[in-house]
Image (cartoon, grey):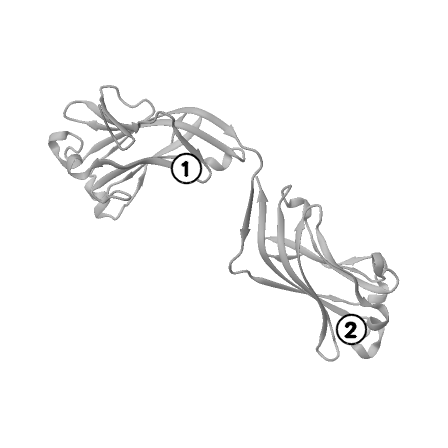
Amino acid sequence: MFQLAGVLRFISDLPPTHYTVKIKSFSLLTKNNIDKYYSGEFEAGGYKWKLVISPNGKNAKEYLSVYLAMVETPSLRPGWEVVATFTLFLLDQNRDNYLTVGDSSGKGRRFHGMKLEWGFDQFIHNKAFSDAVNGYLVEDSCVFGAEVFICKETIKGKAECLSMIKEAITYKHTWKIEDFWKLDQLSHESKAFNGGNYKWKILMYPNGKGNGTGTHLSLFLALAEPASLSPGSKIYVEFTIRMLDLMYGGHISGKATRWFYASNPESGWTRYISLDYFYLPKNGLLVKGSCSIEAEITIHGVADVA
């Protein structure tokens, strides 16, 4: 038994409990530019794992690197964390025993959503591995193995992740309304349209809403499917709503940046434009009973809660 830089190495006569993988024509991995070989899945402690073998090493080219990777993690509950102790094996085919490599601390390693892989950059020096006297690589074939034991399983409390969008994309939608006089005077809404990964709609209150009732036309941008957002999730949006001038090509606009979330799915202006100005024919906003409203949406960030 010997120990180096937190790594415990010893020789064992017992084979690995959970998984072995035999690689024939090992040298062809490098010749075919396979930097990492991922084994098939195996189960240990109620979780799924793979062995990861790097012929040319991860951070030290003169070493062969071997790791243990946790897989199928999307099916686990949010906030999961698993602490596991593991030992990796390499068969000595001459002596029928195993070089075993493990963590000397005995505390185990924390596997979670941001760290799914642990192992040893310097599992074995390439010269020692390739020397037939050592029995690890015989006729270009070798056998690796793994044992994994779970020390602790935890589910963390809620966690939030805010993702700001570096190169945000702007989406536009135009809503043309005909027969304005026939609209429900309380409210009217556009068809849902896509903006990013979400559906939106424009809300209009022809006779106003809140402090704009009876004097102004009110306009809002709203999430069309707010219930589809997970609790606590929110979207940071820059948006503009324009009332187009159908006669002269101009427009009236309002611009804002707001957080949208399930319990607060809309934002806009109760006093967007006075009804007197909107109805005045020379302003070109309402022509022969028709008007057009344009929404421009840019999503700058999304916060998700797990």
Determine whether, in the image, residue 204 is placed left or right of residue 199: right
Camera-near label (2 vs 1) is: 1
Determine whether, in the image, residue 187 is placed left or right of residue 171: right
Q: How far from the left and from the top, in percent, is residue 20?
A: 29, 28
Whether tag 2 and tag 1 are in contact, CB under 8 A, the answer is no
Quarter assignment of residue 71: top left
Q: How far from the left and from the top, in percent, is residue 4?
A: 24, 31
Quadrant, the C terminus: top right
Between residue 290 and residue 97, name the one nearer to us. Answer: 97
Q: Is residue 286 visible?
A: yes
Quarter assignment of residue 257: bottom right
Q: Amino acid at mark 2?
A: Leu
In the image, residue 30 sits, relative to residue 281, either above or below, namely above
- Residue that appears at 50% across and 35% down: 75
In the image, residue 42 sits, relative to residue 207, either above or below, namely above
Q: How far from the left and from the top, in percent, is residue 95?
A: 15, 23
Between residue 173 and residue 99, name the one nearer to us. Answer: 99
In the image, residue 21 sits, relative to residue 35, either above or below, namely above
Name the residue tied to disc 1: 116
Q: Gap between marks 2 and 1, in whole Å?
A: 58 Å
Q: Secondary structure at mark 1?
A: loop
- Residue that appears at 82% across and 66% down: 180
In the image, residue 298 sits, relative to residue 153, either above or below, namely below
- Residue that appears at 71% across and 69% down: 253
Q: Secondary structure at mark 2?
A: loop
Q: How far from the left and from the top, in percent, is residue 295?
A: 68, 64
Quarter assignment of residue 188: bottom right
- Residue that appears at 63% across and 48% down: 234
Q: Of the residues under marks 2 and 1, which one precedes in the sequence? A: 1
Q: Amino acid at mark 1?
A: Leu
Name the residue tied to disc 2: 285
Quadrant, the N terminus: top left
